[in-house]
Image (cartoon, grey):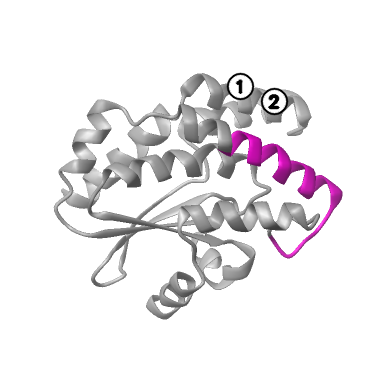
């Protein structure tokens, strides 16, 4: 596992380089990932607008900011994501904002399809659901905890919708985006910090 993590870190991006990579690919008419389609390209374009908006509007809560500033050990937050993924577009900017206020956290983002060996260790119900955040001890690269692909409220919304309608369709995706919009990244921050506190306990 340590070798796989080292390899993934070598393939990873800073947040600004991740954003730049997505933009450059869109300009070439492509999305990130090994699969290419008109739909994935359109999702990438839509997500780029979301990323631009969220970077301006998401704020780290005072409580979470205080907890992040108290971290006295160095961590790497390694996120597996893709530019076309709607959940990643909503979640990664929140994780980025959190890492910005935490002096002892270094954020790295790796593309899921380019790092399948690591993704295979963190499947959700057998699937490669993203984004996936791994909290690593910066010194040993041990995985201390993992989180994702969605906060609990968003996960429940999709489970309830699927139970009622049998599918996850465009309407479900719109409802999910509304949930994220209303939550303003607070649930994501609280869940990640709660997990971090367990690591420290």
Visible residue check, residue 160: no
61 versus 35 height, above or below: above
The residue sitting at 25% across, 34% down in the picture is 65
Q: Which mark is residue 190?
A: none
Camera-side residue of 59 and 196: 59
Left or right position of 88 against 137: right
Snapshot quadrant of residue 162: top right
Q: Which residue is mark 2?
A: 174
The residue labelled by disc 1 is: 178
The image position of residue 69, as x and y in percent, is 19, 42
View extreme (right): residue: 38
How many numbered badges does the structure rendering display? 2
The magenta stretch is 33-51
Residue 190: tell me if it is visible: yes
At x 68%, y 48%, the residue is: 84
Labels 1 & 2 near each other (Cβ < 8 A): yes
Residue 24 location (% of width, % of height)? 68, 57
Q: CA distance from mark 1 to mark 2?
A: 6 Å
Write down the quadrant of residue 90 in the picture: top right
């Amino acid at each position: 596992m340590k070798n796989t993590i080292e390899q993934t870190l070598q393939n990873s991006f800073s947040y600004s380089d991740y954003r730049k990579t997505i933009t450059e690919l869109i300009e070439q008419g492509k999305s990130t990932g090994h699969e290419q389609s008109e739909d994935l390209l359109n999702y990438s374009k839509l997500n780029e607008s979301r990323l631009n908006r969220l970077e301006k509007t998401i704020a780290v809560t005072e409580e979470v900011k205080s907890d992040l500033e108290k971290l006295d050990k160095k961590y790497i937050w390694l996120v597996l994501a893709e530019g076309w993924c709607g959940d990643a577009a909503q979640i990664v900017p929140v994780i980025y904002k959190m890492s910005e206020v935490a002096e002892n956290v270094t954020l790295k983002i790796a593309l899921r399809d380019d790092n399948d060996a690591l993704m295979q260790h963190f499947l959700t119900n057998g699937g490669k659901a993203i984004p996936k955040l791994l909290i690593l001890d910066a010194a040993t690269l041990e995985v201390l905890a993992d989180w994702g692909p969605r906060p609990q409220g968003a996960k429940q919304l999709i489970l309830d919708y699927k139970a009622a309608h049998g599918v996850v369709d465009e309407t479900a995706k719109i409802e999910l985006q509304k949930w994220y919009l209303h939550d303003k990244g607070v649930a994501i921050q609280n869940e990640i910090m709660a997990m971090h506190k367990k690591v420290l306990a």
